[in-house]
Amino acid sequence: GAVVSQHPSWVICKSGTSVKIECRSLDFQATTMFWYRQFPKQSLMLMATSNEGSKATYEQGVEKDKFLINHASLTLSTLTVTSAHPEDSSFYICSAPGLAGLSYNEQFFGPGTRLTVL
Amino acid sequence: AQSVAQPEDQVNVAEGNPLTVKCTYSVSGNPYLFWYVQYPNRGLQFLLKYITGDNLVKGSYGFEAEFNKSQTSFHLKKPSALVSDSALYFCAVRTNQAGTALIFGKGTTLSVSS
């Protein structure tokens, strides 16, 4: 199946700094990618939809100026948490939909990035 | 708006017994339904999906799920649980529009005792 990678897998930063998380589709093109956030032992909450070549679409309640999304190419989307604060500490997961062939209708998830803001 | 309900926070079963993890959904039009499993500090692993066709879907690791349109349910089942099945299970739904995001249930922790 298709593979989605994330980098870094974990990051610790000081409050007020910015952190960039990369999401890559390794063996397929992804014109769309999704960013989710997961708090401990809770569900995945959709934050935004990343669209290659256009602006991201944010879910209600998600601050677009705080969570900057850039879909630079057909295989890369980045999420930048700006001026991070302890409440931004979470597990961030990206995914990309399969749009053709056997992957059609499936969604492929990255391994996640654990962000801890001190 | 789409939504998924997993009514049980935790399901406990003994190894070798059958298990069921419940899921009900709400979506406009025909639903695309999925089950994923998550181990601690790991990403999601795909188990199975229902798109169309046979209501009984078989997936990875011996899991299966039955789509019931009248009850809007998609319960996950396995005839004989293993201790290694202990994990967090998510039911998810999306519309039939290609490329749309999944909406997840809150998750159910499955604990299989030896």
Image: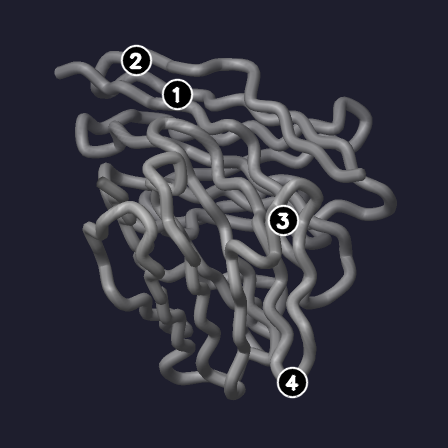
Marks 4 and 2 close (CB-CB < 8 Å)? no
Residue B71 is left or right of residue B73, and the answer is right
| Residue ID for mark 4 | A53
- Closer to us: A62 or A31: A62
Q: Amino acid at mark 2?
A: Val
Residue drawn at x 86%, y 46% as measured from the top left: B29
Res B19 label: 1
Chain of the residue where label 3 is placed in the rendered structure: B
Residue drawn at x 26%, y 39% as measured from the top left: B39
Marks 1 and 3 close (CB-CB < 8 Å)? no
Q: Amino acid at mark 4?
A: Gly
Tag 3's secondary structure?
A: strand
Query: Cα distance, mark 4 to mark 1?
Result: 45 Å
Res B13 label: 2
**Badges 3 and 2, same chain:** yes
Query: Cα distance, mark 1 to mark 3?
Result: 19 Å
**Badges 1 and 2, same chain:** yes
- Closer to us: A96 or B25: A96
